[in-house]
Amino acid sequence: MKNNRFHALQQAQNREEVLVELPSVKVSDYFASMVFHDEVMQNYMPSDVYKSIKNAIKNGTKLDRSIADQVASSMKTWAAEKGANSYTHWFQPLTGATAEKHDSFFMPTQNFKSIEIFGGDALVQQEPDASSFPNGGIRQTFEARGYTAWDPSSPAFIIGRGNGKTLCIPTIFISYTGEALDFKAPLLKSMAYLEQAALPVVNMFDRHATKVVATLGWEQEYFLIDEALFYARPDLVLSGRTLIGHAPAKGQQLDDHYFGTIPDRVYQYMLDLEQECHQLGIPIRTRHNEVAPGQFELAPMFEEVNVAVDHNQLLMDVMDRVAKRHKLKVLLHEKPFAGVNGSGKHNNWSMSTDTGKNLLSPGKTPRTNLLFLTFFVNVIKAVHENADLLRACIASAGNDHRLGANEAPPAIISVFIGDHLQKVLDEVVSKVKSGKLNTEKSDELKLNIHNGIPDVMLDNTDRNRTSPFAFTGNKFEFRAVGSSANCSLPMMILNTIMANQLTEFKILVDKHIKSGDDKEGAVLKVLKTYIESSRNIVFEGDNYSAEWAKEAAKRGLSNVKTTPHALDFFISKKAKETIVKTGILNERELEARYEIFHENYVKKVQIEGRLIGELALDYVIPSAIEYQNKLIQNVTGLKGIGAKATSYKTQMTIIDTISEHISAIYSNTEKMIEARKKANTIHHMPDKSKAYCDIVIPNFELIRKHCDKLEQLVDDESWKLPKYRELLFTK
Ligand code: ADP
Ligand code: MG
């Protein structure tokens, strides 16, 4: 095979769409058929066992061992009936991916007899040999062991691959000393903390609520490309993004892909994926084409945050597996292609009570509207106080290419609330200032606050697609999260800052009440000070504009564009007060994460550096020389027949231009290698990752520029790497 690109193109173009066989029943007939959910539990467990486990889930109490044995036994019976013969603790180490280590239910007894067994011990706790997971130094100092512990609040499920089926038990991952080695343990803590802080506030308005949960509805963006073309691009295979590639004549400028007809192959893929997701209880409801060619999105119905996080992690796995059946590759990288949009994972976040109230949904009565305003304003205030932490928690090597690339929210954190709510807040301020609140309370509460919000709201919000953190009618949408990210971290931060904020709020309100204010008056007074003190974080304009960057600087908002610098916010005094003092992470856990995120950044950039060197030297330059030789042959031939110099003038120019680009590529690659060597002499973080960011990465663009020029210049036949046009438009 002389040129792999053409071979790949031929394969891609000759693909038949793989028709998916759909069950002849409704989705609701098989939804969650592979999940050990509430109804299944009731059917498979004695009622006292069922009650104990429900109680443990609701109140976070410990399960008795004998109860755990019975739970395990019923889980095994159910799983065996579904055809599973092994189980795994399923966890989320700090790699960002999920991890599993399968064990068999089968257990030999005596004389070659055997049984199927799954006891409470195996359900509750496991000790995977996990010494190779990132731990940021936590496990070297004490004990090398890591434990997974069952999280009963997220239901077990069965993953099937071909005929093999495995029972998966969601777990947290902790060290021998109890420190979190994963994303989930701190998320669970933050949920409990939020509940504890939010409930007293909710109870001021609704005495019947006994539970508050954070809810998450993620929207997952992704690219799909043909498998053969994917494998013909070493950069996509190893780094998930194209490191070189000239922009195609047509990109997304015609906006003809967005919400367009879904291509046939992709549609079959989506049906296949959704079917598998539905069996796993992932409530996917929405699918559509996204802005960039080859880009798509899917979104579920929102769920309680930890289940939603698990479902998103699971989804990313399933997406990849299902794609294989369709000879497609899913790209979850934040910026697989320069010049067209990258991918995000909007995190729609809200809170709700067990009395069925969404706390960020404007109510119809004065009382419920004040509840809404309370939570709404406290979110704004929390973001105002902790914008830097929110910036840090979405930082990754991939997301750096997206934030601020004039297509995704910028690296400046701000909140969009829309004109209508802005007016409502202004009114709160002026009413409180006028000081009439205590005397005419119920009338005062009618302000504009209580009239018309629900109706106008849905029309008036969500117009601003450029905001990193937008109020969209009944939830906040954190749009700056990267497409490959584990949602746990941003959710953990949001829960935590909100909990801190609500705690402070309640103290202030109580103070006012003590000094004689009635409840409504006290609430409005505190809200008024919050509205005033957090004005700086609210921005309604175009977040992509240069004016906003200037304005934000004036307002004192941070604009940190790269990961190694943004990560510094994690170890600031403020972050420690927010995260460590509240016990969500201890100091070592926080520092370990800081270390791991830097390491991860360095490794990713290191891989990209090696790759771009390899592409330049092994693919681009040889292609250019091949074409140059053709030109030389042509010139030699023309000279041989005595042609005039003018007839090979253009060829000579191209020959020279090619040489210039080759030499520029070569010298910039050398420079990049030198920079890498220099960065590698630094051994501690964050200096090392900052060196990679500040002195290694800038060379990538220089190398790329000349490679892309050559792509344009070199004859199509000599070019070895699939082009953007082919990657993005082969359907
Ligand atoms: P879009 O933002 O594209 O207009 P939707 O309004 O349908 O789309 O919402 C997108 C996501 O927001 C969905 O996953 C949806 O479930 C989620 N969502 C809606 N309400 C809430 C809520 N109260 N809490 C968390 N997520 C929510
Ligand atoms: Mg949205």
Image (cartoon, rainbow, N blue to C red):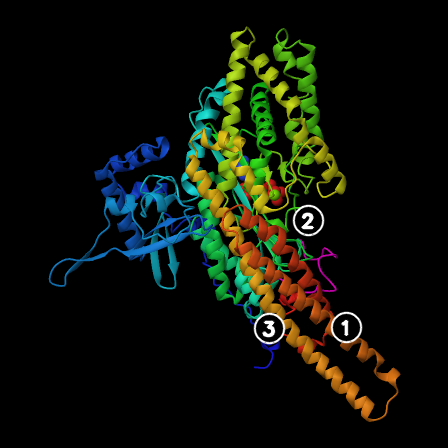
Q: Which mark is residue 657?
A: 1
The amino acid at mark 2 is: Glu
Q: Is mark 1 within 8 Å of ligand 2?
A: no
Q: Are marks 3 and 2 in contact (CB under 8 Å)?
A: no
Q: Amino acid at mark 3?
A: Asp
As for residue 256 lying within the magenta part, the answer is: yes
Give the CA distance from mark 3 to mark 2. 33 Å
Task: Check disc 2 and report its element: helix, strand or loop.
Answer: loop
Main SS category, magenta section: loop
Give me the disc on residue 618: 3
Task: Answer few, some or many: residues within 10 Å of disc 3's Cα (few below 14, many 20 plus, some between 14 and 19).
Answer: few
Q: Which residue in the structure is indicated by mark 2? A: 407
Give the percent coordinates (x, y) of residue 557.
66, 34
Q: Point out the image quarter for the C terminus.
A: bottom right
Left-right relation of 226 to 192: right
Q: Nearer the viewer, mark 1 or mark 2?
A: 1
Q: Is residue 28 above or below residue 263?
A: above
Q: Is residue 652 above or below residue 25?
A: below
Comparing marks 3 and 2, which lies closer to the viewer?
3
Bounds of the magenta span? Answer: 243-258
Residue 221 is covered by the magenta coloring: no
Tell me what residue is drawn at x 82 percent, y 89 percent: 639
